[in-house]
Image (cartoon, coloured by chain):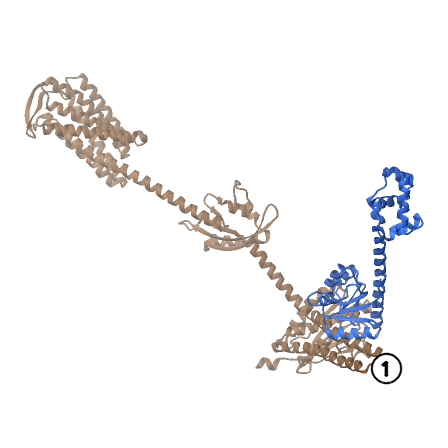
Amino acid sequence: MSVTVPIVHVVDDDVSFLTAISRLLGASGFSVKAYSSAQEFLAQRDADAPGCVLADLQMPGMNGLDLQSALAQTPNPLPILFLTGHGDIPSTVQAMRGGAEDFLEKRASKEKLLDAVIRAVARDSREREARDRQRELRALFDALTDREREVLSHVVQGRLNKQIAWDLGIHERTVKLHRTAITTKLNVQSVAELTRLTQEAGIFLKLVQTFPKGQ
Amino acid sequence: MSLITIIWSMSASACLTLAGINFLVWLQNRTSLPNLFFSLLTIGTAAWTICELWMMRAGTPAEFATVLKWGHVAVWLLILSLVGFVWVYLKAGRPWLAWAVCGLRTLLLVLNFLVGKNLNYLEVTRLGHMRLLGESVVIAEGVPNPSILLGQINLVMLIIFLVDATITTWRRGERHRALTVGGSIVLFILISTAQSMLAFYGVVRVPYTASISIMGLVAVMGYELSSETIHAAELGRKLQETEAGLHESEERMRLAVEAAGFGVLVRDFARNEMWASDRWRTLFGFSGTERLEFEPVIQRIHPDDRDALQSVLEKARSGHGVYDTQFRVVLPSGEVRWIGARGRVEFDRAGKPAFARSVSHDMTREKEAEQEAEKLRQEIAHVDRVSMMGQLASALAHEINQPLGAILRNAEAAELLMQEKSPDMDEVRAILADIRKDDQRAGNVIDRMRGMLKRHNLDMRPVAVGDLVGEVAALVRPDAAARHVKLEFSVADNLPPVYGESVHLQQVLLNLIVNGMDALDEAKSDDRRIAVTAALDGTNTIEIAVSDSGPGVPTDRLKNIFDPFFTTKPNGMGIGLSISRTIVEAHKGRLWAENKSEGGASFRFTLPIAEKDVSK
């Protein structure tokens, strides 16, 4: 994956505050991009770049909560931090339920603000890595044939070749051939490693459900 | 053809025609006995007329006697039906006399057949001739039958009966009928009796021509009866028309009433009965068949409205006549319905109520909307007074937090920039300019608030201090009770009014009391009291003080607490006291705080009295 500098996107309709906070974050060492509305941000942002979003909760037109749900639909759901003059309880609860990284008053201390931004960027980086790894693993698993995936579902449940052959109505040697193909394609050495990889790829549960244990 | 033949036979056939018509009328309506008797009477007349004609043309004395003998049957029928007719038509006459006439006549009929050739003659000796209407007609001579005397008595009795019945009818007030029917019958019977007697005794030589005068009688009676029939038919037709019209207008009325959703109730006081339309029954929750009585209907009325309704109805019954009222009805299901009712009481001649009619309609929705609006109005008034300051504070906090936030972030950014080895001074200058701009912005918000309050000052008028304190007390009492704070209000007697805007002054007082309660909450003390006093201060000023039993204001804060955004409360905005002071100063008064020597804080403000303005 390409290594890019994380960008802090600041969204606020109050241009004066937007400029001030962008200066502070810039002076603190972040790459900052400022937008005076949620629509502007969604239209202009780099679709793939890492970072986080710092958005005013109360904005005319598309407000902070609308932006949060719109962002969650995209393939690059950056963590979002909310800023507010003073937040009311219902919108705070909704924001946190929607997975907001934090909820800050506009006059919160600088340390609190910077800590929250660092945390959000770190979370983005973590989530991004996990997303990349999953994508990679899925690509590996996608290389398997249907029959191989079927055999795999039995293997990860700890069943023996003999049992698998009986269940699937094929010869035990054929099962062995499938297993060799699977371990080669996924580049693993043991059943334990195979199971961990399957789990990590997020398809373990799916496999188990799709091909349930015979009787 | 001879004139006599024409007249007599035409008379007979006219009589028969009348007989037939009246008989048919009687057949259609068996109770119309006059028609039956008249029919019999005309048959008798027709028969006698034929006998007369025959006698005038008789060839031998024996023939004459025989015809006269049978003619008496016609006379018998004629007299009996005449008595019957008078009896049923005039509804008058003495019964015994009627029976006597009929009985004697029947006896005479028997004698007619038993004694001599007929009732008139023991023997008809010879026939004479005379001229009548240019023709020769027969008249008889013979030995008179003594029984004829009874016959004449019978006729006299008949006349007495008729005269008596006529007089009775006349006295009863039916003069027209007495004259036309009774009078003409008497007249024509007199004439025919006289004529037949004269003819019999040979005083004048005339043949038996009683039928001519009897025809007159028949004509009068026939005219009377047929005009009666025509009249009855006319009445019947009119009645039908009226009924149809009535039905039509009733139907129209019913439609209109139903369409408007009105229920109709009629109460008959004399019979103690009530009638109600289906819609009324639905409105008041009675089934379609249930018998209505006053008491159960009254029981349907909501207990709170019952007495009022009773007195409205009583007033209408005791002479006022009309009412227009509203009340609630509790249906058997428990549902409550608002009813609007208008009614009218009709009185009889004695001035007693005879009928009460009323229309009712469902006005539940109107009432509910009315109550809803009233509730809303009260709520708005309350919210207005209680939260005006709170909302103002909240709006201000939001507006002011923006520039304050920007100032803070700019300052922090500048600090960071200055830490660098070679700071970008242009950027720092830009930051400083922005800080100044945002400070200006925050100041503008405060100025706007002040300006807003000052604009309201235009509506200043004299305000009674007692009312001011009383209204705030009412607003704050529930809150104080919930927070276990004892409120003491003490307003000096005979205070002159102050000059100001009532709602704003209420806000100040309310704010001070709520602040006091907040201070008590923080102190967690058992002694939780707030005293509000109002007294004259000098000659031109009134001082109102709000004192609490809390810890008091720390001395170092006393001078700051009126600054905007200065707060010691975790949830405070630091705006209430600032706004309060602005308001008081706009009223040309002062607001300050002090700590009491016995403990607790006291917030005091003064207001100029309004006497000078009142005198203007």
Residue B365, x across and y down, in percent: 57, 54
Out of B316 and B38, give the one closest to the viewer: B38
Residue B548, x across and y down, in percent: 77, 72
Q: Classify residue B428 by image quadrant.
A: bottom right
Residue B389, x across and y down, in percent: 70, 71
Q: Amino acid at mark 1?
A: Ser
Can you see residue B330?
yes
- The 10 Å Cα crowd at callout 1, few under 14, some 14 to 19, many 20 or more, is few
Out of B230 and B174, give the one closest to the viewer: B230
Residue at the spot x=21%, y=28% of the render? B16
Q: Mark 1 sits on what residue?
A: B422
Specify whether A131 is left or right of B219. Answer: right
Q: Chain of mark 1?
A: B
What is the quadrant of the C terminus of chain B in the image?
bottom right
Q: Classify residue B251 by image quadrant.
A: top left
Out of B297 and A214, give the one closest to the viewer: A214
Out of B596 and A213, give the one closest to the viewer: A213
Specify whether A141 is left or right of B391. Answer: right
Specify whether B158 is left or right of B470. Answer: left
* Chain letter corresponding to the colour blue: A
Residue at the spot x=91%, y=43% of the render? A176
* Chain letter corresponding to the colour brown: B
What is the quadrant of the N terminus of chain B in the image?
top left
Q: Is residue B373 above or below residue B435?
A: above
